[in-house]
Amino acid sequence: MKVLKKIGITILCLLLICGIGIVCLFHKEYSSLKSLKKVDAYPMYTMDYSADYGLDEFLEKGASNDKELVEFVVNHVMKGLPLSINIPDLGCSTFIAQNKDSGYLFGRNFDMDYSPSVLVKTKPKNGYASVSMVNLGFVGYNEKHLPDTLKDSLVTLAAPYAPLDGMNEKGLAVGVLLIDTKPTNQNTKKVDITTTTAIRLMLDKAKNVDEAVELLSSYDMHSSANSCYHFQICDASGKSVVVEYVDDEMKAVYPDKNYQCATNFLLTQPDAEFNFGQDRYQIIDEKLSSTNGKLSKHEAMQLLSDCSQDAHKNKQGKISKTQWSCVYDLKNKKVTICVNQNYDAKYTISVLE
């Protein structure tokens, strides 16, 4: 019995030392980790990220690929802990519409295989506060490994560098969508950025579409995960643009209507063989055309439901479907989220609170 008691005490001491070590190593990040809350069983989490994730330092040198981004995050955010960022194929839909109540709404579906998610709230000292949606699968989580303990949640500290859509305190919103063609790799001797760091850049530093476009043009874009993407960007004034990269040249597509939508084909090359998602685009376009570009928040979420993707096998043989749907209220700076195509369960979160 004495031996068992000593073993038990030793184990408890080791666990205590381990816990103290984590707190000491990540003392500035501890409050961020402790703020992680599971709000939906699929699951979806929320996180108030109060630590400094060093975007200004990152932008001094940037990253020309995911490996360089990981190296920066490991050294400057993760305290040397290992990390991998993997962004596979994704098919998504976005649109901007006038809110029938007032202001504008940005709708976003994120379609992929199983994706536990976290809505990250950030308030950088040298930037705008924002909320952004992150697929935790991109940083190594899955159904059997989720951030439900302090130890298992450490990798969520990388979340600010993996946003896929979001909105800041000025009402600037952005979503990224896959284009299934050769990746973008600009080389004009500007600082390099990747797909997700471009979203972080815009959310932190741009208050409107014009500033976002100017920022993107100031950096060399390098697509994440050996793929190509375009961005829909809109702001509280109702201005919208889809930024695309064709043969490494940045192109800005502005709407010729009072609304704009995007899926997974180039608006600058709508007949390209690699395009897909035209069926979802048609659903959105027909609805917005019939309402003169005006929707209530309820109707916006219903439209996302109408163009959502049910479970199907993707090119990798994985079961893919709509993982989350977001309606961003650009005037009131609030986002309403549904996950796993459960449109009866809505979560509304404010950027400003």
Image: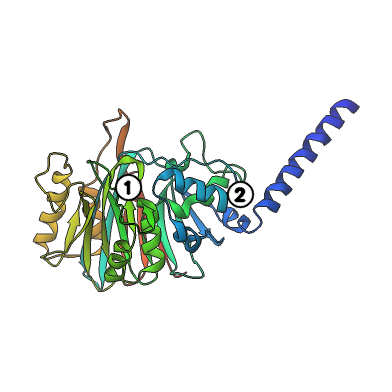
Give the camera-side residue of 351 and 349.
Answer: 351
Please name the colour scheme applied to the rendered image.
rainbow
**Residue 98 point in image, percent of width and height:** 20, 68
Crowding around mark 1 (Cα neighbors within 10 Å: few <14, some 14 to 19, many 20+) is many
**Residue 266 point in image, percent of width and height:** 17, 50
Numbered circle sitting on residue 50: none
Q: Are the residues tagged 2 and 1 within 8 Å (C-beta)?
A: no
Give the secondary structure at mark 2: loop
Query: In which image quadrant can residue 114 be found?
Result: top left
Amino acid carrying label 2: it is Lys
Residue at position x 31%, y 60% in the image: 174
**Residue 27 point in image, percent of width and height:** 66, 56
Give the camera-side residue of 339 and 171.
Answer: 171
Disc 1 marks which residue?
223
Residue furthest front as drawn: 189
Residue at position x 67%, y 51% in the image: 25
**What is the count of numbered marks?**
2
Give the secondary structure at mark 1: loop
322 left or right of 350?
left
Indicate which disc, 2 or 1, sits on the residue closer to the N terminus.
2
Say whether residue 42 is visible.
no
What whole-number distance in Å separates the C-alpha atoms at marks 2 and 1? Answer: 26 Å
Disc 2 marks which residue?
79
Residue at position x 21%, y 46% in the image: 264
Whether residue 10 is situated above or below residue 102 in the rendered picture: above
